[in-house]
Image (cartoon, rainbow, N blue to C red):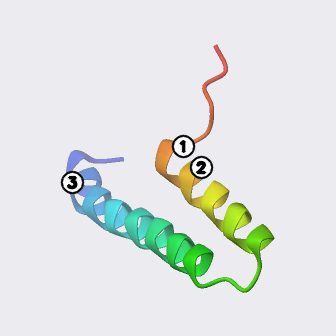
Amino acid sequence: MKKQDVERELPIQLIRSGAGISANLSEAVYGSRRRDFFSKTRIALKEYFGPPCMA
C-alpha cells in the first residue's frame, strides 16, 4: 500500500472505529436487559483495546 493511501485511509478507519464503540456503548446504556448491557459493554471494550496479543 502506498504511503498516500495509508495517510488517506487511516483517519477514516479511526472515525469508523470510534463510531462503532460509541454505538455499542449507547446500545448498552439503553438496552432493555442487564445481560444486553454487559454484552454490549464487553464488545465496546474489545473494539477499544483490540484483540489480545498472542506472543
Residue receiving disc 1? 50
Q: Amino acid at mark 3?
A: Glu
Marks 1/2 in contact by CB < 8 Å: the verdict is: yes
Residue receiving disc 3? 7
Structural distance between the alpha carbons of marks 2 and 3 = 25 Å
Q: Residue at x 30, y 56 (%)?
A: 10
Q: Amino acid at mark 1?
A: Gly
Q: Residues within 10 Å of mark 2 (few under 14, many from 20)?
A: few
Q: Secondary structure at mark 2?
A: helix
Q: Residues within 10 Å of mark 3 (few under 14, many from 20)?
A: few
Lateral position of residue 32 relative to residue 25, left or right = right
Residue receiving disc 2? 46
Q: Secondary structure at mark 1?
A: loop
Structural distance between the alpha carbons of marks 1 and 2 = 5 Å
Residue 4 position by quadrant:
bottom left
Question: Which sits earlier in the primary sequence, circle 2 or circle 3?
Answer: 3
Which quadrant holds the C terminus?
top right
Question: Which sits earlier in the primary sequence, circle 1 or circle 3?
Answer: 3
Lateral position of residue 22 relative to residue 34, left or right = left
Q: Residue at x 26, y 61 (%)?
A: 11
| Whole-percent x, y for residue 6 in the image | 28, 51
